[in-house]
Image: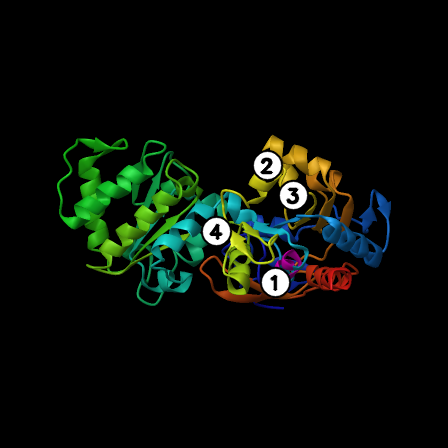
Amino acid sequence: MENVVCTFCGSVCDDGVFENGDVRKLCALGKSKFSKKERIKAPMIDGKEVSYEEAIEKAAEILVEAKRPLLYGWASTVNEAIRLGVLIAEKVGGIYDQCASVCHAPGTLALIEEGVPGGTLGSVKNRADVVIFWGANPVEAHPRHPTRYSVMAKGLLIKDRKNRKVVVIDVRETKTAKLADIFVQIKPGYDYAIISALRAIVKGEKIEADEVGGVPVEKLYELAELMMNAKYGVIFYGLGVTQSRGRDRNVENAIKLVQQLNRKTRWVIWPMRGHYNVVGAGEVPAWEVGYQFAIDFSRGYPRFSPAEFTAVEALVRRDCDAALIIASDPAAHFPRKAVEHLKKIPVIQIDPHPNLTTLLSNVVIPSAIAGLEAEGSVYRMDGIVLRVKKLVETEYWSDVQILEKMYEEVVKRVG
């Protein structure tokens, strides 16, 4: 089978080949996704193996009896499952949150404020003669991104690497920096100041300083000149921007820089998203209820407040009394106080593989692996929807099957 979609990172490469039980043409990260790993063998309630029906009934009972359950994860499942998760959260008056609330959410907040002059990975491949990676390291996080879409990609107007200038801006020299034509090393936490300096230069103002954020002003003038002379430029930003000092303000400022550049030439800006469907985990609730994360339904209608309704905030404040965790492992990654509360409340887990969250879950429901054992639709990091395929048969239920049955059980109890 050809055109197999890889369900690991946000690049969602769609040129895999499935043959003799193996998926070829994948990077090391993609191969690890499809390699054999330990699986959760059967549904369990308090460590005792049960049927899928029993586990789902118990999960529905927990969610309905809770005053304010948390439904978290979603970045590594398909859009059809996410939609059901939003419906369940609404029915039980719970909180819907997804993995972006601990990584790229500042970019979402900036987008709400400023909009986004965006473009597809295809447009970058075909047209971009200047590519900037800011606080991102795709060589290690998205290994095929440089070859398929950005650094070495051959497109309609960009025939080879010689036609493209690549800039890396980061606090350290990453592996991606070694591929760049220009590497700009900045002081940690000075992204906002450097973006502001570039905006001033593009506007025609003079910088009254010798350096900004550890970067000589002469180098900033050279970079601004390169950006203004580009035919089509792109800024790909990563967690080095969203999780450093300034957070959403960094991204807002970068969007304003791109808006200024667009008065002279053509530029776009886009985040380097991590999980293969983390974009879908935000887009699906957005077209269902208007918000992408941190959504509270406890009053019977959706409310959005990142300061109150993210998973971490809800757990640290002890504002939730049950949790459904799907396609995520918060016990391994959340702050200690959040995990301490997670240990005290009933937890339902839906996941193909055991992890630390499995150890504190009251109900564990194993699921099929999307893109291998189950099909569905997902969003690539640039917002393009792709269809992931079912390649092999399995006895495991898909996330969609599990959540459809859970929704039915919830409706029976809630009405």
Amino acid carrying mark 1 in the image: Arg
Q: What separation in Å lies between label 1 and label 4 (alpha carbons)?
A: 20 Å
Name the residue tied to disc 3.
320
Query: Counting residues from the N terminus, which is met first, the one under dot 3 or under dot 4?
Result: 4
- Specify the segment rendered in magenta: 85-90
**Is 40 part of what is drawn in magenta?**
no
Q: Which residue is mark 2?
A: 317
Element assignment for label 3 = loop
* Front disc: 1 or 2: 2
* Dominant secondary structure of the residues highlighted in magenta in the image: helix
Residue tagged 4: 273
Residue at x 78%, y 47% (from the top left corner): 363
Residue 113 picture location, percent across and down: 36, 53
Q: CA distance from mark 3 to mark 4?
A: 28 Å
Distance of label 2 from label 3 (alpha carbons)? 8 Å
Task: Name the side, left or right, on which 69 lies relative to 273.
Answer: right
Q: Along the polypeptide, which appears first: circle 1 or circle 4? A: 1
Identify the image quadrant of the C terminus.
Answer: bottom right
Q: Which residue is mark 1?
A: 83
